[in-house]
């Protein structure tokens, strides 16, 4: 049965106030469109989890959606601080948990495996243990050094953006692979957004690229350009100019609210957002085709 639905409907059906939401994607395939729809629908008291909060969580915190953030690295990548999230934490307005990248992914792996926790090798990040009581040390049952353990993370909802998917939720993604698979398998519900919706035969033609499978997906949404200002490998480039611009926008509540009013509340969906960006931005973000070599799945 087809799971195709609009992004607006998927957020309404599967994201509730108070949920733990994991918006997956590392460097690219960041689901900005879903984040904007959550803001438009006025979802509140969310715990926002991501290995790298990026600008999407800065915007969602600014919009009043969050009560807590769970993260590893936090910043405006290549630019500086996430001013809004950092200020909210420093003022005591936002709860937080911090892990190393490996710690965050290990939490998801535990959740996806149905385990209460998973062990990690000791690292140099001992300061994290001092500020996060959920990072613990336990004896190695085989007599070696103590190991670090972190608890499973099972988000209420994982949102994953992919390059292409069929209408049932089988999905291909390529380029930098982040924590999309782990987040999806750890979550209780999964919303999938895709640059393209393709026939099942396209997915079956390259099974090793199928990172997300239909059996764990609750909603499939066709949302081209959903990652902007991050990028989707092979579809459009990263909008570095916007990342620089956000550093300036986020300096004041007034400029942030003006941005939200114009670019989130002022558009009805991602298509209107993309058209509003204009032809000049479209041209700047356009990428040239560069195909991988063919592979042969033939058999006798």
Image (tube, helix red, strand yellow):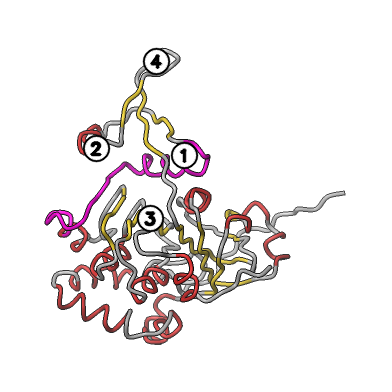
Q: Position of residue 23 (x, y in %)?
A: 41, 59
- Label 1 neighbourhood size at 10 Å, few (<14), some (14-19), many (20+)? many
The verdict on residue 299 being magenta is no
Q: Marks 3/4: CA distance?
A: 35 Å
> Is disc 3 in contact with disc 2, using a CB cutoff of under 8 Å?
no
Q: Quadrant of the N terminus?
A: bottom right
**First reached walking from the N terminus: tag 4 or tag 2:** 2
Q: Which residue is mark 3?
A: 20
**First reached walking from the N terminus: tag 4 or tag 1:** 1
Q: Which mark is residue 144?
A: 4
Q: Nearer the viewer, residue 113 or 180?
A: 113
**First reached walking from the N terminus: tag 3 or tag 2:** 3
Q: Marks 4/1: CA distance?
A: 22 Å
Q: Position of residue 242 (x, y in %)?
A: 29, 72
Residues drawn in magenta = 88-115
Q: Nearer the viewer, residue 231 or 31?
A: 31
Q: Residue at x 42, y 61 (%)?
A: 28
Q: Which mark is residue 128?
A: 2
> Is disc 1 in contact with disc 3, using a CB cutoff of under 8 Å?
no
Q: Residue at x 34, y 20 (%)?
A: 146
Q: Residue furthest front?
A: 17
Q: Which residue is mark 1?
A: 110
**First reached walking from the N terminus: tag 1 or tag 3:** 3
Depth check, mark 4 against mark 1: the one in front is: 1
The verdict on residue 103 being magenta is yes
Location of residue 138 (image quadrant): top left
Depth check, mark 3 against mark 4: the one in front is: 3
């Amino acid at each position: 049965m087809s799971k195709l639905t609009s992004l607006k409907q998927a957020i309404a059906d599967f994201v509730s106030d108070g949920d733990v939401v994991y918006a997956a994607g590392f460097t690219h395939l960041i689901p900005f469109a879903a984040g904007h729809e959550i803001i438009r629908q006025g979802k509140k008291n969310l715990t926002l989890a991501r290995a790298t909060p990026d600008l999407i969580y800065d915007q969602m915190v600014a919009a009043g959606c969050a009560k807590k953030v769970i993260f590893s690295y936090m910043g405006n990548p290549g630019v500086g601080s996430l001013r809004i999230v950092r200020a909210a934490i420093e003022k005591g307005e936002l709860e937080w948990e911090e892990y190393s990248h490996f710690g965050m992914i290990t939490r998801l792996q535990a959740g996806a495996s149905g385990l209460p926790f998973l062990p990690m090798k000791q690292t140099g990040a001992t300061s994290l243990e001092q500020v996060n009581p959920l990072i613990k040390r336990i004896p190695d049952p085989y007599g070696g050094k103590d190991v670090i353990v972190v608890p499973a993370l099972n988000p209420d909802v994982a949102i994953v953006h992919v390059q292409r998917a069929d209408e049932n939720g089988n999905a291909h993604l390529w380029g930098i692979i982040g924590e999309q698979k782990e987040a999806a398998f750890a979550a209780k519900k999964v919303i999938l957004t895709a640059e393209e919706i393709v026939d099942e035969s396209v997915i079956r033609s390259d099974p090793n690229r199928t990172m997300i499978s239909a059996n764990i997906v609750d909603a499939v949404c066709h949302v081209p350009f959903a990652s902007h200002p991050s990028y989707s490998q092979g579809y459009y480039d990263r909008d570095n100019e916007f990342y620089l611009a956000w550093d300036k926008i986020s300096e004041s509540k007034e400029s942030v609210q003006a941005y939200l009013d114009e670019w989130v509340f002022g558009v009805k969906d991602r298509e209107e957002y993309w058209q509003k960006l204009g032809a000049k931005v479209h041209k700047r973000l356009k990428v040239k085709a560069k195909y991988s070599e063919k592979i042969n799945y033939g058999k006798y």
